[in-house]
Image (tube, grey):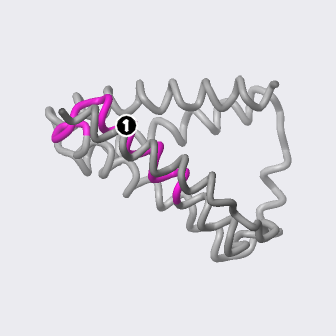
């Protein structure tokens, strides 16, 4: 249950961040807003690590070098979300992001990338994604 609560909090904060970033982007530019957001996020994360006195970050050498670039994806995530918020509005953007995340996750799990055990996906899972796409079409009408 704790994981579900964190997932819901993450989703809520992702939406709030997207709306704030779109507003910031109107004032200073999209890439600038992405840089500002990543910078403040970096500072906030460092502050939290310091406050809880967590030293596990020192084990970063255990992480495969290719995975160390994962944080760089955030720049493209922020740029894409800010631009989508401007073009589509919040509801459509968040819906499309969710569908994209689920679809890519299913593909990654089917292939077994990033250390996950390859899963056999059922037709019902793909039908579920299809129904979500139909739902997003209703949002655009």
Magenta highlight range: 85-103
Q: How many marks?
A: 1
Q: Residues within 10 Å of mark 1 (few under 14, many from 20)?
A: few
Horizontal and vertical percent position of residue 92? 30, 36
Instruction: Let me know if residue 90 is in the magenta part.
Output: yes
Residue 110 as seen in the image, left or right of residue 126 = right
| Observer-nearest of 61 and 124 | 124
Horizontal and vertical percent position of residue 95? 39, 38
Residue 49 as seen in the image, left or right of residue 126 = right
Q: For the point 51% across and 51% down, which residue is it? A: 101
Instruction: Let me know if residue 40 is in the magenta part.
Output: no
Q: Is residue 51 above or below residue 35?
A: above
Q: Main secondary structure of the magenta part?
A: helix
Q: Is residue 129 above or below residue 47?
A: below
Horizontal and vertical percent position of residue 113? 69, 72
Residue 101 as seen in the image, left or right of residue 138 = right
């Amino acid at each position: 249950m704790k994981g579900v609560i964190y997932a819901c909090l993450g989703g809520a904060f992702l939406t709030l961040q997207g709306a704030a970033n779109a507003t910031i982007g109107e004032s200073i530019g999209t890439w600038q807003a992405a840089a500002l957001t990543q910078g403040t996020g970096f500072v906030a994360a460092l502050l939290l690590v310091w406050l809880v006195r967590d030293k596990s970050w020192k084990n970063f050498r255990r992480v495969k070098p290719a995975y160390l670039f994962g944080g760089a994806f955030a720049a493209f995530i922020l740029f894409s979300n800010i631009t989508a918020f401007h073009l589509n509005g919040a509801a459509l953007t968040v819906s499309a992001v969710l569908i994209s995340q689920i679809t890519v996750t299913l593909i990654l799990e089917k292939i077994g990338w990033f250390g996950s055990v390859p899963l056999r996906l059922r037709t019902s899972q793909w039908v579920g994604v299809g129904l979500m796409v139909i739902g997003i079409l209703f949002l655009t009408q």
